[in-house]
Amino acid sequence: MSPAMFKRYLSQHQELDMCDDEIKIDGVTEPFFFHVIYHKEHQTFAEMIAEGHIKDFGKPDAE
């Protein structure tokens, strides 16, 4: 869902406790982005999802 679609959905459904966080990952060849959409009460789970994706798909740390 694009950010514009998310905002339109919220305005049509009067959802006040929803969040849309854009996550940037510095990939091996180029950066890319994804969104995590969640209810505010599930913020801890959304952060876990974002951290897992960054760990799995981001550039390996230089050693």
Image (tube, helix red, strand yellow):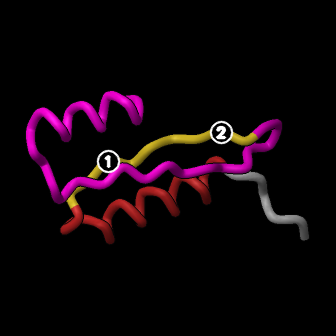
x and y percentages locating residue 42 in the rendered image: 23, 65
User: Looking at the image, which residue is at 73% across and 44% down?
Assistant: 27
The residue beneath circle 2 is 32
Q: Kindly give the residue lying farthest to the left in the view shown.
A: 13
Query: What residue range appears in magenta?
Result: 1-30
Determine the secondary structure under disc 1: strand
Q: Residue furthest front?
A: 11
Q: Is residue 43 left or right of residue 58?
A: left
Q: Residue at x 9, y 45 (%)?
A: 14
Mark 2 or mark 1: which comes first in sequence?
2
Is residue 49 depicted above or below 62 in this figure? above
Q: Quadrant of residue 11?
A: top left
* Nearer to the camera, 3 or 28: 3
Label 2: few (<14), some (14–19) or many (≥20) C-alpha neighbours in 10 Å: few
Drawn side of residue 60 relative to residue 8, left or right: right
Q: Position of residue 43 (x, y in %)?
A: 30, 67
Q: How many marks?
A: 2
Q: Is residue 60 above or below residue 35?
A: below
Mark 2–mark 1 CB contact (< 8 Å): no
Q: Quadrant of the N terminus?
A: top left
Residue depicted at 73% across the width and 49% down the height: 26
Task: Name the disc covering residue 14, or none.
Answer: none
Queried whether the magenta region covers residue 61, the answer comes back as no
Inspect the image, locate mark 1, and give the three-letter code of the amino acid beneath it: Ile
Residue 31 placement (x, y as % from top left): 73, 42
Q: Nearer the viewer, residue 61 or 21?
A: 21
How packed is label 1: few (under 14 Cα within 10 Å), some, or many (20 or more)? some
Q: The C terminus lies in which quarter of the figure?
A: bottom right
| Structural distance between the alpha carbons of marks 2 and 1 | 17 Å
List the single residue furthest toward the right. 63
Marking on residue 37: 1
